[in-house]
Amino acid sequence: MTDTAAVPVPPAADPTFTPPSLGRRFGALVIDWVLCLLISNLFADPVRDGWAPVLVLVLEYALFLGLFAQTPGMYVTRIRCLSWADGGRIGLVRALLRGVLLALVVPAVIMDEHRRGLHDRLTGSVIVATPR
């Protein structure tokens, strides 16, 4: 017997690919940022030590995107970060690089028609909606 389940098409090869709204992406970032402020408060004063929540955010992105393809904020807003070329996970190294680039902010605001910021294009990633 053959498997009749449809094989997902990678975003790069899908002419009908539609990225999730910027509102969902921003909502996920706000949720993740609040979590990072709370976590960094355990070992530093986020107001005095501005590096602490940024460090936690970079590490959160590296671990959660690398292993699960979504951060807690992305889970709540039903989006994922996948490989543009094959639709799989981006892995720990690319997720870490994506987190560092996201912390620089500027790459995130320069987007293409698929709402891929420079941080996405440099790491070969894309944000997609999560099926219900």
Image (cartoon, rainbow, N blue to C red):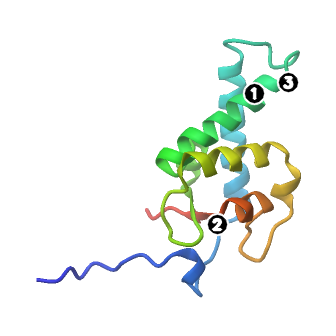
Task: Give the quadrant of residue 54.
Answer: top right
Question: Residue 10: x, y in percent?
Answer: 51, 75
Q: Check residue 34 in the rendering and tell me which mark sits there, or answer none.
A: none
- In this view, the residue in front, 22 or 45, is 45
Q: Earlier in the sequence, mark 1 or mark 2?
A: 2
Distance from Cα at disc 1 to Cα at disc 2: 26 Å
In the rendered view, would you say 32 is above or below 82?
A: above
Q: Amino acid at mark 2?
A: Pro
In the rendered view, would you say 44 is above or below 111?
A: above
Give yes or no for contact between labels 1 and 2 (Cβ–Cβ under 8 Å). no
Question: Quadrant location of the N terminus?
Answer: bottom left
Question: Residue 93: x, y in percent?
Answer: 60, 47
Q: Which residue is mark 2?
A: 20
Distance from Cα at disc 2 to Cα at disc 3: 30 Å
Q: Which residue is mark 1?
A: 53
Question: Quadrant location of the C terminus?
Answer: bottom left
Residue 105 lies left or right of residue 28; in this view the side is right
Question: Residue 97: x, y in percent?
Answer: 70, 48
Q: Which residue is mark 3?
A: 50
Select label 2 or label 3 by which is in front. Answer: 3
Give yes or no for contact between labels 1 and 3 (Cβ–Cβ under 8 Å). yes
